[in-house]
Image (spheres, rainbow, N blue to C red):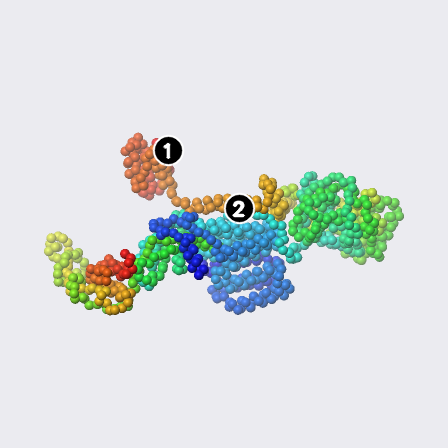
């Protein structure tokens, strides 16, 4: 148990493996410094130089901590904690003097692995974790034994790890889950991406470039048609000439649906986005988690969604929404910023005077989009201060937010209450996992118009321009060279299959491993036939299962201790002796094979030839070193056919 | 105080009779407790579990459980590292006080598994570390300092291992009925006493030419006059006549004639003289207050003398 050079290299490898995944989010100078420290340690070991003086290391440590405090402006919090751990680990390696120091370093490595899960818990991360763990354990065994060679050491570590895997799966399934958090979580715990509650030209098309998954949906029954899949997100009312915002609802009245039909039930697994909104099909009527229904039919979670969230929703595909909208809300739905977009207002006024009914005006507006060479593109030219005018009359190139925005502007200018709804549209069906996956690239914006006796009705001006967007998704509506994410472009069937398989697998992982919470545990164990699940029962089952598995392992492990090597010749001769013993003819422990045979033939003379034959062959094989395969074969068959 | 209490508790809890023959280690004999590092690691695991719960890290749960079960399994590996070993105490060579006594133990590892990092130690901390290859007999020598003459008992020895992670300490106590005879430490060289006058029995035979004592086979270089020609004539082969000279000196190493010094010094002095007399080939006898050994000169005589000196006054046989 000395700190030999190979052991030091092992420790360097451990530290390198656990800190490498952090490199992408650590400050660059920390990564560089750690790398330099590790390299320095390797150099010192290789050249058998002595370690730097203690006061020098202390100085370096203090300087490092100072720099970290400066660059993070705090010494508390997760990011800082991880940075400190990694830097101090590298420094500890430089003052490794005793076995105890090495033990501490190994514990530290185990701890640093877990910090990586704040950033990623994907399948590759899990595989990487197993590999890292194997290296750490092999180093650990090395630390304790010192003189074992690399391969046997690795085998010991691998054996222990392989035994630990089924045990931990069992515990993972049965361990009573406590609904976190136990203490306040720092705000930096979660990244955020996804739909925001504002919309300005370009905001959605930027989002579309991301192939990140927004949520996944499993329908209980038959899923609706693709062009009915409007996943409702933030509803935007207020417009300042450039940006749409949610504003404040002027009423607390719960939304009301009439004449509902065609209910659809489904489960949504929403990725963390650090926003309160939940996505549901137009229009949701029931949700399984405590959530608010805003007056504009938006579903809001009680808190920010900062972990993966699963909920069941029932929506109706046919409805009349809010036939009686309060006047304050109507006012909001007609409000336009003064002084902007005169040409649009003029056009709307012209339509108003031309057509008597709201329906006709809407029809005209949609026809306007359809018939005036509008283009659906991710790279629209920039717009001026009168953004709607510029878009409708000049550039005529834009993405869904341009169409939704200008359509609602037109409606309001014509005196029809209207609002913008953002969310996601469509979704990709994964036949391997029987679910839909909605990516950020499926982000969409459409319009809702309030009509007498019909309530809020959805109109999608994008569908008037690029109907294939609604029917078949974004890639169908875009030219092939558009700057779409790699995965959103249609490719060869092979790649598509691979991608669907991979996503189905990821979904299973998310659902069953990462999303394994109290509720999932309950459902899963109930399906396995467990009743009245309490934590005591879980714990009892867990300990019982662990004891059983450990018992099985023990049996296998201890077998190798008693395995006494009896060779084949010996084994067969013993069979022969056993056959003799059955008829009451036992070989005394001191008796030689030949003596035994002679004694036996004296009494059992009718078997004399067989007994003598077997004995002669046994002696030839065992004592006269006649290693002959055919002789062994004949000996074995002679024993086998020997009968008394 | 706590330490001595702990020691007494241990002695009581793990009391065992002295073993004879072969000891086979089984689960009844092997004790396992976590080490200090093990407790520390448990603390780290609890911290990790709290983090997992707080941040709802599913993969963190898995990592924590993996580490916990791996360290739990390491307990079983520690046990297996010692189980089914067969141990037999071997012969211990006598030593002089102040030297190292080597207690020999024969370990047999019947299984197909190498046993790693086994420690054998006594309560005072003298220890040896070794590996036991699979299906092999291994001889292990534990060096214990022999401080005092007399019998040196190996006392209770501890056979232990921290393999594979050092989180658990598996141990067993071994107390074989082996002891090492420790001769008194020879004093600094002192001239042998003069041949004693009162007794003329002990004469030192020196190969000389006074009395014929027999024939022996010829060895190249023997002097021509010594060849027994008569024997050659009787066709008995080439033989040489042997003569013995009586030196006329007998040597008694007598306790009573020693100067008035401490008992142990006397024993040390006598030890020195026994060794010197033996080396010089002198016939000498040993006379102690309670016993007497007739003068002789051969290895077993020397051993007997040293043994008497070692055990003088201890009451042990």
Residue that appears at 38% across and 53% down? B174
The answer to whether A412 appears left or right of A641 in the picture is right
User: Which chain's residue wears label 2?
Assistant: A
Where is the N terminus of chain A found, in terms of image quarters?
Answer: bottom left
Task: Give residue A563's quadrant in the image.
Answer: top left
Residue A558 in sight here: yes
Task: Give residue B119's quadrant in the image.
Answer: bottom left
**Vertical placement of residue A472 versus A184, above or below:** above
Q: Is mark 1 on a helix, strand or loop?
A: helix
Q: Is mark 2 on a helix, strand or loop?
A: helix
Q: Name the residue under label 1.
A: A641
The answer to whether B239 appears left or right of A533 in the picture is left
Q: Distance between the residues labelled 1 and 2?
A: 51 Å
Q: Name the residue under label 2.
A: A543
Residue that appears at 62% across and 52% down? A180
Q: Which of marks 1 and 2 is nearer the N terminus?
A: 2
Q: Give x and y (percent) for residue A547.
A: 50, 45
Marks 1 and 2 share the same chain: yes
Using the image as rendered, state which of residue A99 and residue A136 is in the foreground.
A99
């Amino acid at each position: 148990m000395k700190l030999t050079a190979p052991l030091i290299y092992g420790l360097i490898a451990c530290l390198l493996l656990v800190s490498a995944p952090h490199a992408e989010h650590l400050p660059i100078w920390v990564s560089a410094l750690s790398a330099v420290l590790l390299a320095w340690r390797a150099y010192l070991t290789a050249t058998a130089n002595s370690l730097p003086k203690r006061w020098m290391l202390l100085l370096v440590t203090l300087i490092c901590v100072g720099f970290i405090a400066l660059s993070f402006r705090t010494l508390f919090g997760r990011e800082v904690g991880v940075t400190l751990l990694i830097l101090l680990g590298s420094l500890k390696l430089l003052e490794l003097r005793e076995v105890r120091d090495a033990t501490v370093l190994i514990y530290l490595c185990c701890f640093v692995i877990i910090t990586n899960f704040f950033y990623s818990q994907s399948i590759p991360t899990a595989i990487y974790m197993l590999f890292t763990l194997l290296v750490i354990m092999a180093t650990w065994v090395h630390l304790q034994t010192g003189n074992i060679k690399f391969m046997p050491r690795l085998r010991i570590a691998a054996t222990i790890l392989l035994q630990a895997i089924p045990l931990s799966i069992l515990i993972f399934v049965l361990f009573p889950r406590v609904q976190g958090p136990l203490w306040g979580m720092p705000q930096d715990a979660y990244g955020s991406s996804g739909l925001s509650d504002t919309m300005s030209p370009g905001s959605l098309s930027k989002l579309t470039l991301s192939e990140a998954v927004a949520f996944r949906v499993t329908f209980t029954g038959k899923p609706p048609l693709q062009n009915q899949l409007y996943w409702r997100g933030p509803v935007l009312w207020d417009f300042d000439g450039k940006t749409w915002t949610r504003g404040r609802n002027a009423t607390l009245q719960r939304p009301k649906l009439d004449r509902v039909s065609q209910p659809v039930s489904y489960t949504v697994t929403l990725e963390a986005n650090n926003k309160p909104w939940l996505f549901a099909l137009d229009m949701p009527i029931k949700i399984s988690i405590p959530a608010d229904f805003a007056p504009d039919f938006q579903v809001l979670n009680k808190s920010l969604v900062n972990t993966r969230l699963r909920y069941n929703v029932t929506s109706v595909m046919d409805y009349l929404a809010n036939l009686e909208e309060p006047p304050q809300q109507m006012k909001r739905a007609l409000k336009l910023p003064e002084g902007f977009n005169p040409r649009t207002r003029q056009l709307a006024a012209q339509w108003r005077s031309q057509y008597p009914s709201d329906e006709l005006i809407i029809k005209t507006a949609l026809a306007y989009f359809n018939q005036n060479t509008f283009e659906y593109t991710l790279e629209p030219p920039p717009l001026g201060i009168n953004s709607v005018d510029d878009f409708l009359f000049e550039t005529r190139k834009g993405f869904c937010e341009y169409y939704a925005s200008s359509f609602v502007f037109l409606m309001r200018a014509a005196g029809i209450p209207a609002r913008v709804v953002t969310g996601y549209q469509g979704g990709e069906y994964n036949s391997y996992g029987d679910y839909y996956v909605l990516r950020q690239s499926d982000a969409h914006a459409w319009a809702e118009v309030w009509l007498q006796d019909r309530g809020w009705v959805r109109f999608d001006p994008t569908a008037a321009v690029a109907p294939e967007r609604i029917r078949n998704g974004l890639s169908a509506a875009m030219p092939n060279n558009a700057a779409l994410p790699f995965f959103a472009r249609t490719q060869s069937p092979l790649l598509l299959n691979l991608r669907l398989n991979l996503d189905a697998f990821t979904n299973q992982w998310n659902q069953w491993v990462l999303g394994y919470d109290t509720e999932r545990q309950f459902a899963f164990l109930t399906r396995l036939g467990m009743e009245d699940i309490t934590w005591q029962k879980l714990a009892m089952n867990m300990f019982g299962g662990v004891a059983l598995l450990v018992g099985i392992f023990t049996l296998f492990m201890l077998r190798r201790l008693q395995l006494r090597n009896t060779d084949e010749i010996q084994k067969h001769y013993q069979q022969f002796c056993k056959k003799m013993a059955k008829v009451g003819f036992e070989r005394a422990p001191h008796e030689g094979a030949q003596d035994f045979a002679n004694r036996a033939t004296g009494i059992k003379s009718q078997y004399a030839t067989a007994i003598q034959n077997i004995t002669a062959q046994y002696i030839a094989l065992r004592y006269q070193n006649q290693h002959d395969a055919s002789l062994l074969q004949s000996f074995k068959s002679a024993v086998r056919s020997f009968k008394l | 105080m706590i330490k001595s209490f702990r020691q007494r508790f241990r002695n009581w809890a793990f009391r065992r009779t002295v073993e004879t023959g072969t000891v086979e280690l089984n689960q009844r004999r092997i004790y396992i407790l976590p080490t200090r590092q093990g407790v520390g690691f448990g603390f780290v695991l609890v911290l990790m579990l709290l983090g997992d719960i707080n941040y709802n890290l599913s993969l963190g749960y898995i990592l924590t459980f993996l580490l916990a079960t791996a360290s739990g399994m390491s307990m079983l590996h520690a046990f297996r590292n010692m189980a089914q070993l067969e141990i037999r105490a071997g012969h211990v060579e006598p030593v002089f006080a102040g030297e190292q006594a080597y207690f020999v133990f024969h370990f047999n590892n019947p299984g197909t598994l190498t046993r790693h990092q086994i420690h054998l130690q006594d309560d005072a901390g003298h220890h040896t570390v070794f590996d036991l290859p699979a299906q092999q007999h291994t001889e292990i020598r534990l060096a214990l300092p022999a401080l005092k003459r007399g019998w040196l008992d190996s006392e209770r020895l501890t056979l232990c291992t921290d393999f594979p992670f050092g989180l658990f300490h598996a141990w067993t106590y071994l107390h074989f009925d082996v002891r090492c005879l420790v001769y008194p430490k020879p004093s600094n060289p002192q001239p042998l006493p003069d041949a004693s006058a009162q007794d003329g029995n002990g004469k030192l035979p020196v190969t000389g030419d006074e009395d014929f004592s027999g024939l022996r086979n010829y060895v190249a270089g023997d002097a021509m006059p010594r060849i027994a020609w008569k024997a050659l004539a009787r066709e008995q082969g080439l033989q040489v006549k042997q003569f013995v000279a009586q030196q006329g000196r007998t040597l008694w190493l007598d306790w009573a004639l020693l100067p008035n010094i401490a008992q142990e010094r006397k024993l040390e002095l006598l030890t020195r003289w026994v060794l010197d007399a033996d080396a010089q080939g002198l016939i000498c006898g040993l006379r102690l207050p309670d016993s007497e050994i007739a003068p002789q000169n051969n290895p077993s005589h020397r051993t007997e003398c040293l043994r008497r000196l070692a055990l003088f006054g201890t009451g042990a046989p």
